[in-house]
Amino acid sequence: RCLSDWSSDVCSSDLLNNICAAQMVLGNLRQAAADCEEAFRLSRGIPDAVGVGIGNLGPIMAQQGNYSAARDYLEESIRLNEAQHDLPHLAGALGNIGPVYRYLGETTKALAAYGRAMALAREAHDTGGEAMALFNRASIYTNLSETAKAVADLREGLRLQEHSESSRETVFGLTALANHETSSGQVEEGCAHAARALTIARRFQSRELLRLSLAAQGTCEMHRDDLPKAKAEFEEAIQQIESIREAAGGAGEEGQDFYPDKMASYVTLMSVL
């Protein structure tokens, strides 16, 4: 129906939501938020489209550093998807709210969300969704210093990603595994994973993927005692962070919390100057 007429609210909201998702991948968070908010507004009152856009607003708010707003949007998205028995989008919302709960210190809720997301993804044969939930759960285990569990989740997620149609999510697993390996003395293994992540990130030209993989590569070069290369990698990672910040919009004046999970690149760069 939308191929012949994009003027209806249903089709317009769906189109805006897709544009929003593309803008989010590119790191244009201010524009992404505007597109998704309009998609959500248009979807209200349409039985088969209500909630369009809200599922992306949560991750956008999280990337901007506004974790309280992200939680509110994602909890509403979960409620709407449960009511509509929309299991694929429910799994996505659960996977996205996990990092938000983790950042807000609600570890138990985060682990429960990842558990539900993995079960739903497995039921739907969504290997990419299951892998991403594993990568996210690994980050909790890392924070809890449960390294063996974290590495096991990362390796299983990467194994599942081999069967996924998209390699984009692979970067999250590769960079996390690279950091574990280099810190435990497996420098060349970690460097190989970091290099692979950076190759994928450059292909997608995603600022978020680039800043993660550049930081992992920089850490690798530090363990190789190649400080000039490490410096160059961290400088480029910081350029990506500042580009994300510029495109995010509003975080400073609204009291949002953008930098804490990205400060490691700044601190490490200072140590190699």
Image (cartoon, grey):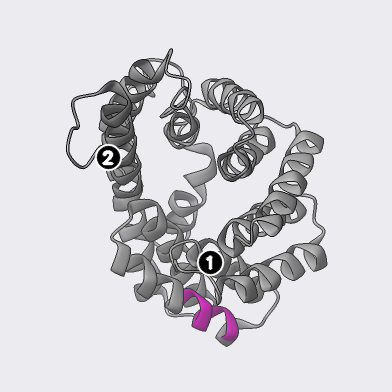
Residue type (three-letter) at the residue carrying disc 2: Ile
Residue type (three-letter) at the residue carrying disc 1: Thr
Give the residue drawn at x 18%, y 25%: 7
- Kindly check if marks 1 and 2 are in contact, taking CB atoms under 8 A apart as contact: no
Give the residue drawn at x 49%, y 73%: 222
Q: Earlier in the sequence, mark 1 or mark 2?
A: 2
Which of 206 and 168 lies nearest the eye of the viewer? 168
Cα separation, mark 1 vs mark 2, equals 27 Å
Q: Which mark is residue 175?
A: 1
Q: Position of residue 1 (x, y in %)?
A: 27, 37
Q: Is residue 179 above or below residue 94?
A: below
Q: Is residue 136 above or below residue 7?
A: below
Question: Magenta segment, which residues?
Answer: 189-194
| Quarter where residue 124 is shown | bottom right
Question: Any magenta on residue 193?
Answer: yes
Q: Is residue 117 above or below residue 4?
A: below
Tag 2's secondary structure?
A: helix
Question: Any magenta on residue 107?
Answer: no
Q: Which mark is residue 166?
A: none
Give the residue drawn at x 56%, y 71%: 161
| Badge 1: residue crowd in 10 Å (few <14, some 14–19, many ≥20) | many
Q: Which mark is residue 19?
A: 2
| Quarter where residue 23 is shown | top left
Give the residue drawn at x 60%, y 28%: 84
Compared across the picture, whether 224 is left or right of 46 comes to right
Foreground tag (1 vs 2): 2
Q: Position of residue 65 (x, y in %)?
A: 47, 31
Compared across the picture, whether 230 is left or right of 99 comes to left
The quarter of the rendered structure image containing the C terminus is bottom left
